Amino acid sequence: MELATPLAMELRVFEEHRNEWSQTHPGKYVVIRGETVLETFFEEYADAFRAGLEKFGASRSFLVKQIWRDEPVYFIA
Amino acid sequence: MHTFQVNWNPFDPADPGPCIKVIVANTDDTIEAGRAVGLEYPPAQVVTALIDTGSPFTIVSRVFARNRGLFLTNAAIPIRVIGGECRCDEYCGSVSFPDSNLPRIQTMRILAADFNREAFFSCLIGRDILKNWDIRFEGRAGRVSIKA
């Protein structure tokens, strides 16, 4: 089923694992496409993206997300 | 060491601040992988970016990100701004500086937000890029010197 919000399915998968991953891999980056999660967690965003590109290709977006228990909200001035 | 200077008028409230020309595009890896499956990408477009020490991230306008076909990697990220909160999308891209010899940033995350009624620039160069540079703001001289 196509979801209206971009990466909605991937974000749902992330939320299902947030508590677990925030304890085992805090601050690391995870890569998700659909319901498929890359087994490796990454220190750097660029490394996570390259791994996602290698695994999933460029035909459709995938989620690259840093793992925090509470989502930080940054300030922009 | 690469050096570059930009000018602005800090005594003119209408001056947007120190700006630099940039090219924000997909990474080389993305383009290669995309072309392998038949995707096409628009030619590079030079835009004006504001050097913004107040932003932790580099941000482009949402319209620009979509038009350039940047690769989406996150969505609906909450950001606080003066007077409220907004949601940004996140793309992976590269940033280069065509009028200078400043080194290109090959792969980085780039946020995208609505630049409402902004006439001067369509990109903010945030601290994620500035952290790689030595910058000197010379207010009275109206000059910003960058070393990278």
Image (tube, rainbow, N blue to C red):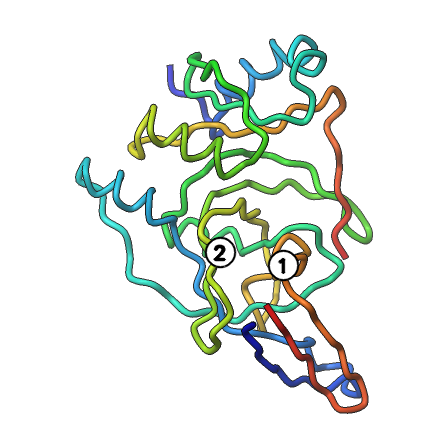
- At 45% from the left edge and 38% from the top edge, which residue is drawn? B72
Mark 2 sits on what residue?
A: B105
Judge the density around disc 2: few (<14), some (14-19), many (≥20) Cα neighbours within 10 Å: some
Residue nearest the viewer, comparing B143 with B42: B143
A74 versus A29 height, above or below: below
**Dot 1: chain letter:** B
User: How many labels sit on residues?
Assistant: 2
Residue nearest the viewer, comparing B137 with B103: B103
For the residues bearing labels 1 and 2, Cβ distance under 8 angstroms: yes
How far apart, in angstroms, are the residues tagged by discs 1 and 2? 10 Å
> Which amino acid does the dot numbered 2 rest on?
Ile
Task: Give residue A74's mark.
Answer: none
Q: Secondary structure at mark 1?
A: loop
Q: Residue B133 in the image: x percent, y percent?
A: 64, 64
Q: Are marks 1 and 2 on the same chain?
A: yes
Task: Give residue B132's mark.
Answer: 1
A32 versus B74 height, above or below: above
Q: Secondary structure at mark 2?
A: strand
> Which comes sooner in the sequence, label 1 or label 2?
2
